[in-house]
Amino acid sequence: MKRKPSTEATSAWIRLMRVQSRVLDCVEQDLKKAGFPPLAWYDALLELSRAPSGELRPVELERQMLIPQYSTSRLIDRLVDEGLAIRRECKIDKRGQFVEITEAGRELQKRMWGAYSAAIEKYVGSKLSDADAVKLSGLLDRLGCSCGEMKLPPAINVNETLPSR
Amino acid sequence: MKRKPSTEATSAWIRLMRVQSRVLDCVEQDLKKAGFPPLAWYDALLELSRAPSGELRPVELERQMLIPQYSTSRLIDRLVDEGLAIRRECKIDKRGQFVEITEAGRELQKRMWGAYSAAIEKYVGSKLSDADAVKLSGLLDRLGCSCGEMKLPPAINVNETLPSR
DNA sequence: CCCCACTCGATGCACCTGCATCAATCTTGA
DNA sequence: TCAAGATTGATGCAGGTGCATCGAGTGGGG
């Protein structure tokens, strides 16, 4: 029950922590320097923009983004404050609501993708061949699945979390 | 200057973000459930315990842990509050100080390693063969180096960031 | 010797997060 | 049909983080 990890596993763990925090930091920094809001805003805007009619229930958004409920709630607050989304009442379930992306929201999402994709290329793409990127993805997937419980229909949604071009 | 990332790179990026936050979450959760403080405390206690005489300048700690200065300062506050470390004045440089780990600190670090290593095994070790762990480390290293600037003498320190057994 | 630039560490502020809990509404099942 | 329980979303509070800035101390050039 308490087998110790191999030094190989431990070393992989350390690198996973250090490298992602480093790379994430770099990307967020680039976005910020370009005058854009945090990545979480982008993710939310993207999910909204891809929803059939540009609107989602907060609960959906929460599940897509894998962030806690209160976090979603406040993220939506901020988007609404900035005019990037609006809340709509949900007629079929009066507890709930819909969040709809605005034109400004769609536009910001697109502009952010320019800076965001450049950063991904700079900090990831340019360091790895496509083949190696695939290997890395594969290894990471083995860690990710069933950490807690899987909420997403396995791999497909994850693949589309960012526009592919 | 603005080449777009390949879909392979993008997909690796997404997995890197999602998987590490998931795995980190699981590990932190396990530690918390076992009644332990956050991982950052462990890291700091470990660095201190490994220092020649159990003490370090805050600046050193900061560089080892790759966290900002104010963050180090407040982390030390908390350790001191809990009696896990004490501040000592630094006679040669009166701006500075030394932080020394206490017996309680050393003991906590050891007890945490029990839970921590178990979590690493559970969420990483058991999902990957040693060979794959090595591959993963290798791929991650390619991303990590020279994201900003390298501050550590390349690989060796990183390897020893955790006790090896 | 002294001044200026730098390093070290602390801290006020704004904001963000996690946790617990709330009210409102929906659903279930007896 | 109605009460018990589940679900949706908001929020008060405590604590953590980033940013800017500060005061103390050092050290090197003139």
Image (cartoon, coloured by chain):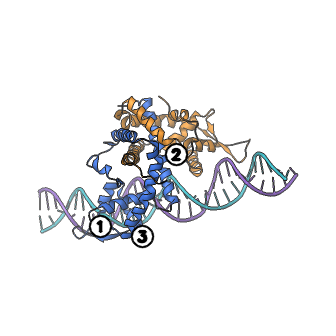
Chain colours: A blue, B orange, C purple, D cyan
Instruction: Identify which amino acid the numbered label 1 is placed on.
Output: Phe
Q: Position of residue B164 (x, y in %)?
A: 48, 29
Q: CA distance from mark 1 to mark 2?
A: 40 Å
- Pointer 2 chain: B
Which residue is labeled 2 in the image?
A: B147
Q: Residue at x 36, y 70 (%)?
A: A103
Residue A81 image label: 3
Which of A142/B23 is in front?
Answer: A142
Q: Position of residue A61 (x, y in %)?
A: 32, 59
Which of A38/B29 is in front?
Answer: A38
Q: CA distance from mark 1 to mark 3?
A: 16 Å
Which residue is labeled 1 in the image?
A: A98
Is B74 placed left or right of A4 in the picture? right
Which of B108/A104 is in front?
Answer: A104
Q: CA distance from mark 3 to mark 2?
A: 34 Å
Tell me where residue A12 sits by quadrant.
Answer: top left
Q: Position of residue B73 (x, y in %)?
A: 59, 49
Q: Residue at x 44, y 55 (%)?
A: A116
Cβ atoms at labels 1 and 3 below 8 Å apart: no
Cβ atoms at labels 1 and 2 below 8 Å apart: no
From where the camera sits, is residue B94 visible? yes
Image height of A102 relative to B51, above or below: below
